[in-house]
Amino acid sequence: MAKIGVAGKAETESGPLTIHVEDGIAHLTLQRPDKRNALNDVLIEELRAFFAAPPEGVAVALLSGSGGHFSAGLDLSEHVSRPAPEVMKHSRHWHSVMDMIQFGGLPVVAALEGAVMGGGLELAAAAHVRVADPSTIFQLPEGRRGIFVGGGASVRIGRILGPDRMVEMMLTGRKYGAEEGLALGLAHYLSEPGGARDQALSLARTIAGNAPLSNYIVIQALSRIDDMSRGDGLFAESLCAALSQTSDDAREGLKAFLEKRQPRFG
């Protein structure tokens, strides 16, 4: 696991996931370029280990892939035949890791390029901000391979696209390009060619400058409020407002606004 030194930097040894921490931003890079960064159990475990205990001082994670691709999904070459109960346990483990990424409290910005397919799209959908390079291709090919999604797509991607469009996408194996993905919400930003990582880093720096409690509440609350009834959601919103608006960071934010300067959050 990465360790931050006195200069605020950190490195990991080479492996399927490399981690470099600098100025409060953890750069997580999927490092299986010969497999288009296909996801295997080792890589999923390294993602779990990082998000279970991010290094102290990390404010935002920037997730990307190496070799011109984000991730082509599950590594079928390492697929292990399992009985149904074990398949379910394996799927539920993926769910727990994706939930850790989405709800762990650490903002995650994903820089997307090339293949963002199957499990790779499930991983991207767990991130909070997604920047797509024009080369990005989104696909859920499971339906054409005789299998079904198992890493959370039916919930996360289904809520982005709606069930009708997701059914069509899986039945036909349809691919969406970067501009189509932007229009559908699979990406939030479309970068210049080759610029997804730089734009993602710029956004990560902006997010790192927010009040930590505000970032945490936004991540924890909004998706859960979407699951609630209208009345319960409004009540939860009031609780979040009460927590954030009475914090030291809120007082600093108001003072900085009145003094026409950038806030210095704790």
Image (cartoon, rainbow, N blue to C red):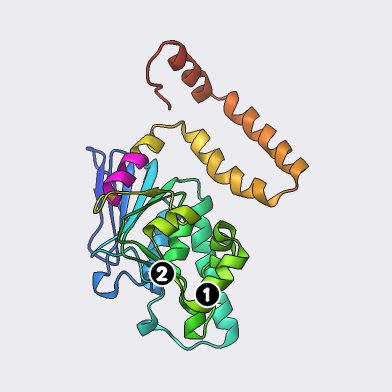
Measuring from the top left, give residue 96's x and y in whole percent.
Answer: 53, 63
Using residue 114 as the reference point, say whether residue 182 is left or right of it: right
| Above or below: residue 39 compared with residue 182 | below
Which residue is label 2 attached to? 117
* Side of 225 relative to 173 (left or right): right
Label 1 environment density (alpha carbons within 10 Å; few <14, some 14–19, many ≥20): many
Q: Give the vertical position of 103 relative to 97 (above or below).
A: above
Nearest the camera: 7 or 206? 206
Residue projecting furthest to the right: 231
Q: Which residue is at a point 60% across and 43% down the rendered structure image?
A: 221
Q: Is residue 237 magenta?
A: no
Query: The residue tagged with tag 1: helix, strand or loop?
Result: helix
Is 203 magenta? The answer is yes
Is disc 2 surrounded by few (<14), some (14 to 19) or many (20+) residues within 10 Å? many
Instruction: Tell me the distance, in whole angstroms, between the alpha carbons under discs 2 and 1.
Output: 11 Å
**Which part of the image, by quadrant, shows the N terminus?**
bottom left
What residue is pinned by disc 1? 170
Give the label, 2 or 1, closer to the camera.
Answer: 1
Quarter placement of the C terminus = top left
Q: Amino acid at mark 1?
A: Met
The correct choice, above or below, for 230 with respect to 44 in the image is above
Estimate the x, y position of residue 234 in percent, counting from the top left. Answer: 72, 37
Q: Which residues are magenta?
A: 196-204
Q: Residue at x 36, y 41 (%)?
A: 204
- Percent across and percent down for residue 109 are 39, 49
